Each structure stands twice: as structure tokens, then as C-alpha cells.
Amino acid sequence: MKTKSSGRKNKKHKFVFVVGGVMSGVGKGIATASIGNILTSMNYKINLVKVDPYLNVDAGTMNPTEHGEVFVLDCGLETDQDMGNYERFLNNDASKYSYMTSGMIYRDVIEKERNLGFGGKCVEAIPHIRDEIMDRFKMSARESDADISIVEIGGTIGDYQNIMFLEAARVMKVTEPENVIFMMVSYLPVPGTLGEMKTRPTQNAVRQLNSYGIHADFIIARSHIALDDKRKEKLAITCNIPASHIISAPDISSVYDVPLNFEKDNIGEMITKSLKLKTTKSDLTKWKAFVKSRERAKKKINIAVVGKYFDTGAFVLSDSYLSVIEAVKYSAFKEGFKPELTWINSKVFDKDSAKVKELKKYEGIIVPGGFGESGIEGKMAVIKFARENKIPYLGLCYGMQLLVIEYARNVAKIPDAHTAEIKPKAKNLVIDIILEQKKKLLEKNYGGSMRLGAYPAILKKGTLAYEAYNQTEISERHRHRYEVNPEYIKTLEEAGLVFSGTSPDGHLMEIAELPKTKHPFMLGSQFHPEFKARPLSPHPLFTSFVKAIKKLK
């Protein structure tokens, strides 16, 4: 869905601000991505922006079990998982200007003050923090060369953390009223004892937004059932919004149905009219084809995802591996399968390695990325089982490093093979820290200091990797500090392990695999292929993994 900017001379950039009402976690990110999807299909170039109000400079140091997946952009910026949804729904790469946090804003303003950038003035939240936010919104618009920026402001109305961002958006509306509109995503509960949808919480949220000097132009009404005309009329009267600008957003089976659901209410046409833009018909043909491929997929494949970020109490936080899950879906749908993913905490195999035999019932195994010692021996037992029992295996980042260690221990017979991340004084550090990272760790420089973002790699012909990509040079996104130790490469290769992808200078090992003569599909990538998987362009490695399962079935 990549589109060119409309090229209007002296065009005025348009802004759509998406805010939350009543409660968080009801789908602001998916709503934002879906609106961007629709407007893109109307031949407008869209810039999606995520605002996270927390004081972290980026999402890199956050615990995945609490905050969900850390998504990495091509530029290396570690972001909120909503950025992944943005890229997937627009089938496009986001830039570093598409993401901002309160931490970024305050850091830059304070640094400017320390360098006398304000000429000795008293630096305050208003106007200096507010103006820095406005400048970043406008910079993002300029750098994207887009027609419309859709800005999702994290949190909900009433959160102290996002007040400055709302104030910046309000001032932009005052100064350019024809170029700015607001959308509120708000939840309408249906209490079980009443069985009736209640609009009052949303009415109160709109009034609170009004108290900030902001009027919602649209309400996206989230609920587990569709909004009826009676409630639309009630919200229209009480919130001073046309009934046609209240979009019903009921719970549905898949987030990928959201753009199609929104278009039933002609949201694209109404937004462009509100922004005084030319209205064209949306064309969601390719998106509909993807949705239908999901619906047509009936045959099941059972895949085990063996990770460590699952111990969050009585429930499983699959958001920790969101991009992996979605990447599997895209490739499975493409091959006509419906994936059934089972989350397995690797720590259970730490305690009882014999339990690994239970994995025999799965047709494929994925070990995704992660950090730290917990669950590592359990993952190693899983990898050994997959190798010996010829179960298709895909290892991502840490999953690739552990593949190498397991092979070193049990096939290449390298005693005490380990990783410097866990056992830095081990005799044989098959996985060791990147040289330039050692100083950063000594200085306790953890945030944004790993090998991050897109790097090129060269593939060897005649390998699984080359067969998957069908090209010799690729670019993939990384997020790690440790690499295969060059001192052991020759020994591992002589033992039968194939390093099918390397950095252009041949120094860093990017992909490790076993030949097809030894295993139907045993491959690990040092990079994170899931970050570049899209509904309309599934990732080659995930597709090859699914094809291997398909062939065995």
C-alpha cells in the first residue's frame, strides 16, 4: 500500500489526534493503524505517530512481561509495540520521527537549557515543553513528506502524564483549525447485571476532554457489541457530535477486520471532509484478500512457542512475543493453514528435562528472543529434542545463539560451551559479547546501546536461508549484544553446522542452520525477522518454516 505524497504545492499538513477515554487497553493503537490503512487506500500518504507519556527515553529497558514487546525500527529506535501494528497495517517502515516519549522531550529541553539554548530564560513546562512537543509533531510531518499525520496519544483522558501532549495538540487546533481534528476511542460497558449498554462513562470522558479546551470531532465507540442507532443519537446530543461521526467498534474475531468494519461507517470519507481534503473512494482490495485468506485457512498446524516471558501470574502475556505470533499467522495463512500456538514456559524444562518429550505432539517449535539466565537450560533441552526428532525449528536471536551452543555441546563435543551473557568465565565461550559492547556494559550504559536496527547480511547459495529469500543480500533488524565467537566457527562448521548468513565482511554470523540432509528445517537467525513480517508481505523465513511443516504433514 505504499503511496506517493499528493504533491500539492504549498499544501497544509493535516493532523488527526487520537486520544483515549474511560480506560486504556481498548484498541487505540489498532484504531489508529486502521484509520491509516483506510486513508492510505484513498491515495493519501500517511504518517503514523505514537506518543508514550512515560519518562523512559525509549521502550528498550522496559520489562516485556509488564509492558509487552519492544519493537525495533530500521533506525534502531526501541519503541512501543503499537509501532509494529503501524508498520504492519501500512505495509511500510516507520522512521525515528514517528515515535516520542515524555522522556525524550524533557531530556532534549534540559540539554538545550544546559547549553544556554534558551538564552538564560526561566525554562518551564509551558511554553518550553509544550513547544518542544509541537516542534516534534511538525518535524515528523516534514520528515515523512506525508499528507496526514495520525498521532496516537497514549493513556486516557485525565492521566496527568499526557496533559502536555494534549495541550500541544490544543494549541495546534487553535492556530490551524482547518488542519486538526480529534478522535476519542472510548469504551461503552454493558454491565452483566443490567444487560444494557451505558453511555455515561463516555459522556463524562468527553466533558473532561472539553475541560482541556478540546472538542472531539469523532468518537470510536468500543464495546463487545455493536452500537445501535439509539445510543448513537444519545451520544450525539450529549457530546455535541454528529451521529454520523460516532463509529461503532464492536469486538471482532481479528484486529485485521477493523479497517473493513470502520469503512462500513464511511470513516475515511468523513475524515477527509472534516480536514477539507479531496474525498476519493477507498480501495481495500488487497486487505480484503488477506482477511479472506485467514478465513479460508481451515487446516491446523500445531506450533509450540517456548519462551521465558510467560510467568505473569494466572494468565499468559502473549504480547511479549506479539510480532512473532503475527509473523507466524501471515505465513500460515499464505500456505492455507490456521496456526494453533501453544505458549510454553521454558523454565518447566529447567526443573524436569524429561518433560521435553511432550513436545513430540507439536509440528513445529519456535524459540524467540530473550535476555538473562532463567529458562536457558530448558530452551537448550527443547532445541536438542527438536534436532534429534527432526521437528522443524526456528530460533530467533537468543534462539539462534542457543542452537549454536546446543550443537557445540552435543555434536561438536566442545565441553563447557556457553554464552558470556550467562557464564562469562566459562572455558569455551561459543557466544561472546561484541567488542564494542564491553565498554558500554562496564559503564552500565544499557539503554539504546545494543546492536540495534537494520544491518545487511550476505547469504550462501544452496542453503535454507538462500532458498527462503531467493537473493544473496538481505537487510534485517537486530537487538542484541552477543555474537557467535569467531574462534569457534571453523570447529562448528567441521562438525556440520552451516553459517548460511554473515555480515558483509564475514565477521558476524547472522544465520545458522543444518543441511536438509540432516534435518527438514533447523534454522536460527541472529536478527529478528518478525519485525519485518507484514500481512501483505509475509516474511520468507517464517514462510519457509511453515512450508517445512506442510511438507512433513
Image (cartoon, rainbow, N blue to C red):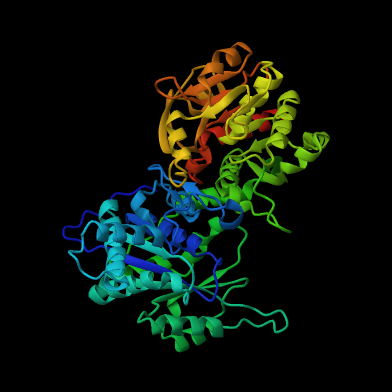
Instruction: Residue 150: name its quadrant.
Output: bottom left
Q: Nearer the viewer, residue 510 or 247?
A: 510
Image position of 315 with respect to 370: above or below: below
| Image position, residue 418 (x, y; %) | 63, 27
Outermost residue toward the top in this view: 494
Image position of 336 with respect to 210: above or below: above
| Image position, residue 212 (x, y; %) | 38, 81
Instruction: Residue 541: name its quadrant.
Output: top right
Q: Going 67% across and 23% down the picture, which residue do you hit?
A: 416
Taking the image as drawn, is residue 543 in sight?
yes
Taking the image as drawn, is residue 101 in sight?
no
| Image position, residue 412 (x, y; %) | 66, 15
Q: Nearer the viewer, residue 413 or 50?
A: 413
| Image position, residue 446 (x, y; %) | 47, 45
- Say whether residue 523 is left or right of residue 91: right
- Say whether residue 513 is left or right of residue 450: right
Image position of 252 with respect to 302: above or below: below
Q: Which quadrant holds the C terminus?
A: top right
| Count of numbered badges drawn on the protein | 0
